[in-house]
């Protein structure tokens, strides 16, 4: 591989022991000497091999620099060894996950920590960013996170609580959406901040006194004494195991009451015949395009994402309605499929955040779709978020791929429902305008009228 | 999504020995210097917090393990007391737990 362009991942710098690099589609990681030594031993650890085989840890192996130019570039940066990971279809962040996704990711982190402890290892951190998704299955991606147990307490506890446990407790006990909180606080919700959410009887709900009130009180008291002696304290294996048992029992018991949102039980307004025609249309486009990646935006419970799944490598099924996405996740989680459900609002896509705005990538920068479905979403964006069709079509064109867009006429009963109570009439929202704007940006491949012409599907093909 | 609790296992998963309640006393005598390898800030008072929560978890686990043992003891006693009846109750509720007992003479 000559002339390899190796780029350091802008989100990988916090752990000084290693750094992730990208070389084309390859994901590589430079290790310092201590981490390299650890990895040699880790490869033989039973828990690591077992979870690697079970697909719970992403395939990871050392790269020999002799025949690999990308590895040589990384070694020249001062690292002692280079690992290669299997690439992920799409990187997502916990502020795009549903409650059950964050819970399952937390349980995977705890399971690995428990099994690691039994073999004399421990994870040095506990962030959901070390867990990603293949389809709807969580996978741990940061092998060098494991280091030999040093006899101290679990250093990752506070991070685990801030990034996993406090958001889950706030969601389960108070029904507060944790996603905006995690999006605003990249390091999670610390116990002292989480404590402010709980009042009265809610303080006595499972896990709140133990994992929020108590740590917040102790931290406040300990901060008054300098320096804190806590970072280097020995702890018995029984206590470490007890903590993991405590956390596992607490996380497992949490439930988000079933969210009965407008869309979880949404029954489409089509006749059976029209609905079948719509499905056939999507199926035909998917077969024709054979896309690597499909973005179904406004996916609801994933009906059309499921139609695309057999013809694509990856389908991102995104919707702003967390109840609908949760339903899709729960139906997909035990299936070996390629649909990743995410809570995403197209009118407010996840931005680039953190250091230099690049530590967490903006949604659009994390993948290149080959097909975008935008079914019955345009009228919501126009009437609900005041986004003109032309602006939406501009955004679509920037993705440089085909799209299937459904135009809902303002006379349609669903559009009428959205317009009721609005003084603004959105006079520009007409089929003629939409078609003219679409034709300026795309080649209109095919049009399918549905519901007696009240709705139309447009296959918009990318033009150079 | 939720792993079922191991009912009969009296050691922690992963084979870590549980020294019953004596560990509770140990919880408060754990502070000695050790090499730390964490790059993240564990937070002020982390050792105390994790020790106390660990002790609570250990007590909970041990108590449940004992409760399961006691339940098993009585379930076994019930089966032994009525060997000839081969009650459907035992067969229904504890089939997996006592597979061989009804075959005893």
Image (tube, grey):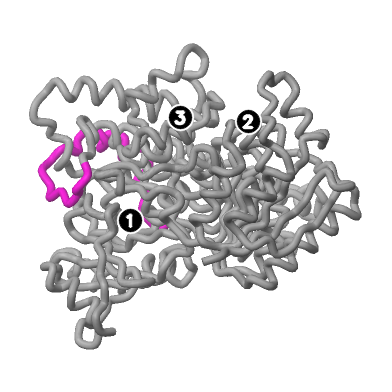
| Residue highlighted by disc 2 | A384
Range of magenta residues: B13-40
- Disc nearest the viewer among 1 and 2: 2
Tell me whether marks 3 and 1 sit on the same chain. Answer: yes
Q: Residue A407 appears at what percent x and percent y? A: 72, 46
* Contact (Cβ within 8 Å) of mark 1 with mark 2: no
Quarter of the image for residue A461 reads bottom right
Within 10 Å of disc 1 (Cα), the crowding (few <14, some 14-19, many 20+) is many
Quarter of the image for residue A307 reads bottom right
Give the chain letter at badge 1: A
Q: Residue A2 appears at what percent x and percent y? A: 25, 84
Lower position in the chain sequence, tag 3 or tag 1: 1
| Residue highlighted by disc 1 | A117
Within 10 Å of disc 2 (Cα), the crowding (few <14, some 14-19, many 20+) is few
* Contact (Cβ within 8 Å) of mark 3 with mark 2: no
Image: A200 above or below A394: above
């Amino acid at each position: 591989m000559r002339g390899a362009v190796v780029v350091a991942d802008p989100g990988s710098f916090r752990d000084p022991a290693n750094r992730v690099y990208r070389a084309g589609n390859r994901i590589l990681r430079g290790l310092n000497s201590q981490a390299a030594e650890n990895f040699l031993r880790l490869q033989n650890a039973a828990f690591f091999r077992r979870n690697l085989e079970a697909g719970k840890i992403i395939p990871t192996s050392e790269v020999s620099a002799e025949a690999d130019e990308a590895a040589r570039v990384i070694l020249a940066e001062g690292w002692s060894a280079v690992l290669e990971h299997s690439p992920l279809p799409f990187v997502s962040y916990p502020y795009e996950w549903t409650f059950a996704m964050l819970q399952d990711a937390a349980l995977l982190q705890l399971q690995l920590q428990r099994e690691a402890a039994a073999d004399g290892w421990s994870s040095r951190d506990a962030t959901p960013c070390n867990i990603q998704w293949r389809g709807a299955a969580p996978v741990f991606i940061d092998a060098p996170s494991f280091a030999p147990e040093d006899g101290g307490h679990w250093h990752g506890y506070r991070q685990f609580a801030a990034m996993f446990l406090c958001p889950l407790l706030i969601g389960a006990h108070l029904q507060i959406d944790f996603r905006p909180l995690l999006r605003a606080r990249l390091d999670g919700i610390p116990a002292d901040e989480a404590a402010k959410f709980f009042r009265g009887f809610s303080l006595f709900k499972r896990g709140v006194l133990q994992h929020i009130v108590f740590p917040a009180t102790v931290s406040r008291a300990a901060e008054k004494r300098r320096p804190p002696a806590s970072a280097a304290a020995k702890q018995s294996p029984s206590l470490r195991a007890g903590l993991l048992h405590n956390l596992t029992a607490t996380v497992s018991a949490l439930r988000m009451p079933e969210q009965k949102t407008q869309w979880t039980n949404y029954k489409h307004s089509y006749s059976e015949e029209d609905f079948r025609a719509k499905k056939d249309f999507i199926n035909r486009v998917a077969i024709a395009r054979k896309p690597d990646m499909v973005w179904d935006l406004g996916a609801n419970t994933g009906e059309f994402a499921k139609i695309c799944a057999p013809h694509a490598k990856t389908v991102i099924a995104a919707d702003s309605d967390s109840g609908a996405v949760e339903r899709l996740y729960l139906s997909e989680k035990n299936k070996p499929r390629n649909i990743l459900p995410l809570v995403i609002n197209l009118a407010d896509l996840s931005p680039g955040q953190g250091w230099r705005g690049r530590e967490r990538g903006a949604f659009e920068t994390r993948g290149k779709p080959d097909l975008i479905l935008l079914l019955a979403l345009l009228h919501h964006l126009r009437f609900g978020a005041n986004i003109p069709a032309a602006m939406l079509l501009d955004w679509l064109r920037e993705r440089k791929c085909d799209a299937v867009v459904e135009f809902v006429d303002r006379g349609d009963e669903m559009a009428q429902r959205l317009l009721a109570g609005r003084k603004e009439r959105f006079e520009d929202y007409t089929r003629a305008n939409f078609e003219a704007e679409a034709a300026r940006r795309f080649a209109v491949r095919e049009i399918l009228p549905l519901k007696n012409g009240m709705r139309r599907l447009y296959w918009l093909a990318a033009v150079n | 999504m939720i792993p079922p609790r191991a009912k009969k296992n009296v050691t922690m998963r992963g084979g870590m020995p549980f020294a019953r309640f004596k560990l509770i006393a140990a919880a408060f005598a754990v502070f000695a210097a050790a090499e730390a390898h964490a790059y993240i800030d564990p937070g002020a008072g982390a050792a105390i917090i994790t020790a106390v929560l660990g002790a609570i978890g250990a007590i909970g686990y041990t108590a449940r393990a004992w409760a399961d043992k006691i339940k098993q003891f009585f379930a076994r006693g019930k089966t032994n007391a009525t060997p000839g009846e081969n009650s459907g109750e035992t067969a229904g509720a504890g089939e997996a737990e006592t597979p061989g007992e009804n075959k005893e003479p």
